[in-house]
Image (tube, helix red, strand yellow):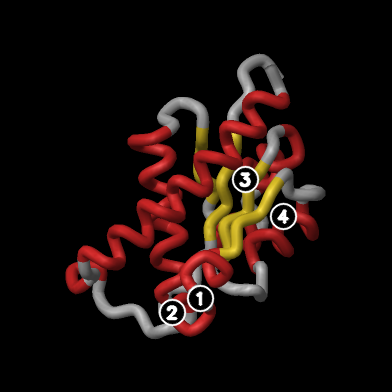
Amino acid sequence: MSEILVGVLSCSGEEYLGGTLARMATRKVMEELRPGKVVTLCLPLYIAGGEEERRFAEEYPVIAVDGCKEGCAKCATEKYSGQVKDQLIIAELIGETTALSRTVSMKKLTKEHEKMACRIAEEICKKVDRILEEYQ
């Protein structure tokens, strides 16, 4: 490992708000808050046998960002690549009822949803920073 990168494997639960917020927050971290330090891994590809995704998770630290307590991102990582370095369960931040509420179109997300995504992104950044500090 030359340069340390942190992988973020986010929930892909399309029909629930927790999954949508997981993906929104992950993109925000990757593109705006920690560019060049974070990469995202595709959960459906990971589960379908994506060797590049799985190999990355074997070699680099991964944070699972799960929408609910089912922990699909964490479980997939542990099944195919090994232990996750950390996990964030969105339902614990915003409440299970909210996380499991039905999602409407991305076009109809409210300012409140955007605030939730920002809060989740901040929590992901805290975990990323701790990991990067550990590897320095």
Q: Is residue 88 above or below residue 110?
A: above
CA–CA distance in space, label 1 to label 3: 30 Å
Which quadrant of the view contains residue 127? top right
Q: Residues within 10 Å of mark 4 (few under 14, many from 20)?
A: many
Q: Identify whether 82 is placed above or below 33.
A: below
Q: Are marks 4 and 2 in contact (CB under 8 Å)?
A: no
**Of the residues tagged 3 and 2, which is closer to the observer?**
2
Kindly state the secondary structure of the residue where label 2 is placed: helix
User: Mark 3 and mark 2: span between their CA atoms?
Assistant: 30 Å
State how far apart marks 2 and 1 are (Cα). Answer: 5 Å
Residue that lies at the very extreme toward the left in this rendered image: 107
The residue at which mark 2 appears reads as: 98
Q: Which residue position is annotated with label 3?
A: 53
Q: Are marks 2 and 1 in contact (CB under 8 Å)?
A: yes
Classify 119 as above or below 13. Answer: above
Q: Which residue was labeled with disc 1?
A: 95
Label 2 CA crowd tier, 10 Å (few <14, some 14–19, many 20+)? some
Q: Which residue is mark 4?
A: 77
Q: Nearer the viewer, mark 3 or mark 4?
A: 4
Number of marks: 4
* 106 vs 110, nearest the viewer: 110
Q: Position of residue 73 (x, y in %)?
A: 63, 61
The residue under the point 69% across, 34% down is 60
How far apart are the two marked residues, 4 and 2, measured between alpha carbons? 25 Å
Identity of the residue drawn at 73% across and 64% down: 75
| Closer-to-camera residue (116/73) | 116
Q: Please, what is the three-letter code of the amino acid marked with disc 1?
A: Gly
Helix, strand or loop under label 4: helix
- Upstream in the sequence, badge 3 or badge 2? 3
- Residue 44 x %, y %: 55, 62
Give the side of residue 21 with respect to residue 49, left or right: left
Query: Is tag 3's residue or tag 4's residue first in the polypeptide sequence?
Result: 3
